[in-house]
Image (tube, rainbow, N blue to C red):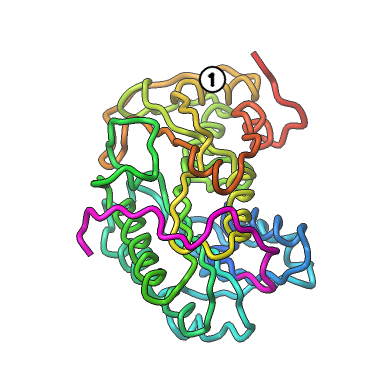
Amino acid sequence: MPPNLQITSIGRSRNSLVPPSKTILVTGGAGFIGSHLVDFLLRKGGMKVIALDNFDPCYSKKIKRQNLAAALKHPDFTLIEGDITKERDLERIKSPIDSIVHLAAKAGVRPSIENPVEYMRVNVSGTANLLEFARKRGITKFVFASSSSVYGEKKDRPWSESIGDLNPISHYAVSKLAAEKLGYVHSRLNGLDFVALRLFSVYGERQRPDLALSKFAKLIRRRKVIEVYGSTKTARDYTYVGDVVEYIYRALLQKNSGYEVFNVGCGRPYSIMKLISTLALQLGMEYKIVVTPAKQGDVPSTWASNKKTDEILGRITRTSISLGMARFLGKKKQIRR
């Protein structure tokens, strides 16, 4: 397939919704987004949920198990410790699977530049493994967590799924775009319903400790200086995890979707200074920053067009950054300026 081929839809029908499938496999189910999705599906009821997670040591296994504290008590939940890159681990899943939500990945733009081979092994080869598992098992629905980083430094914003000639600028972004293309091939050849959700800067409760918001909160509480890379004008489309989970569920509900790509973002970029000031306001504390050189792989801003997502998956009331921040900090009330 030509490297710049941009296909966002080979769907067979649109706006066709069906009840959730009987058993859903969530890879990376003990992680930040995965554990929220597991809890969401179990609350919905009427389905069994299997989480597959290899408890990658990028952060504490104890934290990840705590993420699943409620789920582990639920009769319709099963946790399997396993690795998507190992066929034998996938073969341990004996239950019939109706749908897969693939969240497992080596995450992070900057670490991928330091260790590109490992990112390709896990994010590309691991996804290929899982797609082949789906083919062999007759699984017809596959929802994949892609990333806004696939857009690279495209200057036309907001970014829409129809933008072609994508040129990612990190190995992480390349691995996500490659996984999307693998999904396209399986959809074309095997009739798989493959939905790629390009997630924009997800934040919220249980966020990984290495992500910006977690770091900033820790530094503000300790009255330490926050490093801002590149420029105070850097902006991101910050998206609350609860909104992401809602759209994953809606993607699961689509019948005969074929191959589709959707942006999942707030639809509004916030500057890094707006993020830090909102966080400090919620904490009721002062903050200090220092601007340091930009890091390789970082883009100056991201901004999602939600037009296609809202038209096909349905519009939701997206969580404001002040409310999402309050929830992230475990506060009952948000503080407004």
| Location of the N terminus (image quadrant) | bottom left
Q: Position of residue 283 (x, y in %)?
A: 64, 24
**Where 288 falls versus 103 (above or below)?**
above
Residue name at image x 46 percent, y 60 percent: 11
Nearer to the camera, 132 or 328:
132
Q: Is residue 153 visible?
A: yes
Nearer to the camera, 151 or 301:
151
| Location of the C terminus (image quadrant) | top right
Instruction: Name the element at disc 1.
Output: helix
Q: Amino acid at mark 1?
A: Ser
For disc 1, the marked residue is 277
Is residue 19 toward the left or the right of residue 157 in the image? right
Is residue 159 toward the left or the right of residue 309 in the image? left
View extreme (top): residue: 337
**Where 88 falls versus 26 (above or below)?**
below
Residue name at image x 63 percent, y 82 percent: 96
Q: Is residue 126 visible?
A: no
The dominant secondary structure in magenta is loop
Nearer to the camera, 38 or 226:
38
Is residue 327 toward the left or the right of residue 100 in the image? right
Residue name at image x 62 percent, y 35 percent: 318
Residue name at image x 35 percent, y 44 percent: 162
Q: Position of residue 219 (x, y in %)?
A: 52, 30
Nearer to the camera, 132 or 297:
132
- The image quadrant that residue 282 belongs to is top right
State the extent of the magenta-drawn residues as a range. Answer: 1-24
Q: Position of residue 172 (x, y in %)?
A: 33, 53
Q: Is residue 18 magenta?
A: yes
Q: Position of residue 209 (x, y in %)?
A: 52, 46
View extreme (left): residue: 2
